[in-house]
Amino acid sequence: MLKIVLLLLSMAAKNSVKTYVENAFYHVYNQGVEQRNIFLDQQDYSVFLSYLQTYVSPKDTTSLYSIISSLDVSSKEKDRALKLLKLRNYHGALQLCCYALLPNHFHLLLLQIKMGLNEFMNSLGTRYAMYFNRKYRRKGVLFQDVYKAVLVYSDEQLLHISRYIHQNPTEWLNLPPNHWRNLPYPSSLPDYLGERRTIWVTSKYVLDIIRKFCNWDDRQQFSKRTYDRPRELNSQEVLLQSFRFRCKSLSHFWYTFLLWRF
């Protein structure tokens, strides 16, 4: 946990100034003011995720108008539908590729197709802070500062960031990566291992990179460049090498391998 906190502090200083470009990936993160917790129970995690889902999913205006005009719907439901109708939607402008939520910080990997990341993050942060302050009867800022964003320049960096994000929950508890199940901290890792399909999480870009490096020699070179840990093939890897002709259909498997072996 200390390693993650120190890394967040060092990253924060150099990623405060942001460069926005279209059709680019960004590693976006933020933490609580004075490193205080921003998620105190499972409801907090669920609310934050519901906000993410609302922003990046298509807005169902037909259903919202139907709720507003219905005589059988409560005024509370109508008010909620009206707010969602007015809320800016980022479907088509942004795609959420990875996420991990920890007690005092969060990580997102976003693809900005059209300009809108800055407005999205400001709206998300403000909306969640209002929810948090209202629930816990507090005042003041919730987050340490404005969010930080890292522009991704290469496929290797994209895969490395997804790996870093998905290992965050287990590292927070000082557990090995294969202990990710049943952790209290939500992440998109199950979508990458083929154990869940969240329609508002886009995993194809990272998994396509896995397919790109499915050739064993390419994958070996990739792992060396990315993690600088060259080593001899062990018996398990020799066995895996024999399956390389099936690799295109085993992208989830290769992601698991790269996640835990390097």
Image (cartoon, rainbow, N blue to C red):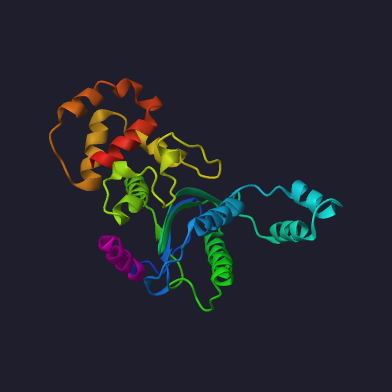
Which is the main secondary structure of the residues drawn in magenta?
A: helix
Q: Which residues are magenta?
A: 1-13
Left or right placement of residue 120 versus residue 149 in this view: right
Taking depth in this image into account, of 41 and 111 the one nearest to the observer is: 41
- The number of numbered discs placed on residues in the rendered structure image is 0
Write the residue at 43% across / 34% down.
194
Residue 130 x %, y %: 58, 70
Whether residue 242 is visible here, answered yes or no, is: yes
Left-right relation of 121 to 104 = right
* Front residue of 189 and 163: 189
User: Is residue 155 covered in magenta?
Assistant: no
- Asked if 237 appears above or below 35 in the picture, the reply is above
Q: Is residue 231 above or below residue 244?
A: below
Rendering quarter of residue 250: top left
Give the residue displayed 29% in from the left and 28% down from the top: 215
Rendered view: 155 above or below 74: above
Q: Quadrant of residue 262?
A: top left
